[in-house]
Amino acid sequence: MRNADILPLHDYIVPEEESERIRIWKVWLAILVVFLHSYGEDNLLFRDGGASFGIPLWLDWTEYALTQVVTRCAVPGYFFIASVFLYRKSFTWRGNMRKKLKTLLVPYLIINTVWIGIYFTAQHISFLSSFFSRPDQFVANWTWREWVNAYVGLKMNPFIGPLWFVRELLIFNVLALVLKRLIDAAPKVILTVLAALMLLCIEPEILHRLRDGLVFFCLGYYFVKYDIHFSDVDRIPAGLLCGAYFVSLSVDVAMRDMTYQYLPRILSMGLGMLFFARFVTKIQRNTWRKKLLWFSGYGYCIYLFHENTLSLSRKVAARLLPQNTLFQVLEAVGVPLAVIAVCVAVGVILKRYLPKLYGVLTGGRKI
């Protein structure tokens, strides 16, 4: 590789205390992602018909606020952290892509393939088939276009929905050096362009999410370029940050399903990232800090394994439990927490008994 292809950077030092805070931050982001995907309105689709439950209005709005507004800072946070860790050290395009094929593409292909196999098998077992019943996921009836879409996600998502983040992250890594050079050449101009992009109402959703990911990925490099750290975030007055975040959340919720809801959502996403980084990563008690750091080692397992596990768990709960208000509240909280526990347990078992498989699935990540 030519010297011109090597990324020239000053050292971006991440002290141990800050590294631990980032790992704890990722724990909360993983939890937020699971709750983000737990919101399902009041309908669940079974092969023998849809199940609809009369969710009280207050519960629906509460769930919406917590799972569709507060949690929206999670995926931008992942893009931001991935960018910081990429740009903090010098790299070559070829070396970085070789690494990312292992850490991103291989798990992406394996997880999609495993779940497609699970769905295909379950759809041919009578007592399981009703739980694997979405028409677009009936594998035996797929055309070649649907097979391509299952892996590439041309319409919006690959077969395992959350893997769209991995797909986008691969794209940004391909463009990483180009993005870096553009920002270095005209940092103020590019920042203005990014801000303007965030103000545009972009459709379809696949382009909307690609835009959001691009912006927060680029912001990660700005933090590296200008040597911004947690200590700088900690200087933001607590009252000002909490007040601004609460107002942005309130406006976001109040504008539910309105055309211009994306405008307060931009603010609530950015402030949410600052809020969680500022207030839930400074764990003083050593016991709790150690537990959260241990938990952070399985954050990628949660991200990879949670969505279909969550969907199936909600269907099972809907079939087995009475659907009154009390149980609906318990399910809204209990099912996501149970899924998180299951994903961590699977990660622990794989790491202990099948370490090579665990390494392949997680891309060899240590944290």
Image (cartoon, rainbow, N blue to C red):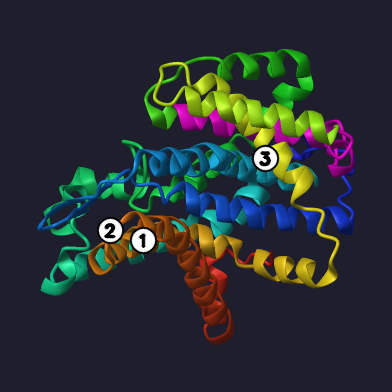
Q: Secondary structure at mark 1?
A: helix
Residue kind at label 2, given as amino acid type = Gln
Residue 22: say if magenta. Answer: no
Label 3, on which residue?
Answer: 80
Write the start and end of the magenta stretch as one range: 208-236
The crowd level at tag 3 (other Cα within 10 Å; few <14, some 14-19, many 20+) is many
Where does the image place residue 42, in percent across and percent down from the top left?
A: 28, 46
Q: Identify the image quadrant of the N terminus.
A: top right
The answer to the question of whether label 1 and label 2 lie on touching residues, with beta carbons closer than 8 A, is: yes
Say which mark, if any, is on residue 364: none
Q: Secondary structure at mark 3?
A: helix
Where does the image place residue 38, in percent across and percent down from the top left?
A: 42, 51
Task: Answer whether residue 270 is visible to the viewer in this image.
Answer: yes
Residue 223: say if magenta. Answer: yes
Image point 66% across, 54% down: which residue? 26
Label 2, on which residue?
Answer: 323
Image point 74% across, 34% down: which residue? 242
The crowd level at tag 1 (other Cα within 10 Å; few <14, some 14-19, many 20+) is some
Image point 49% across, 75% down: which residue? 346
Residue kind at label 3, given as amino acid type = Phe
Mark closer to the observer (3, 1): 1
Q: CA distance from mark 3 to mark 2?
A: 39 Å
* 252 on left or right of 43: right
Residue kind at label 1, given as amino acid type = Phe
The crowd level at tag 2 (other Cα within 10 Å; few <14, some 14-19, many 20+) is some
Q: Identify the image quadrant of the C terminus.
A: bottom right
Label 1, on which residue?
Answer: 327
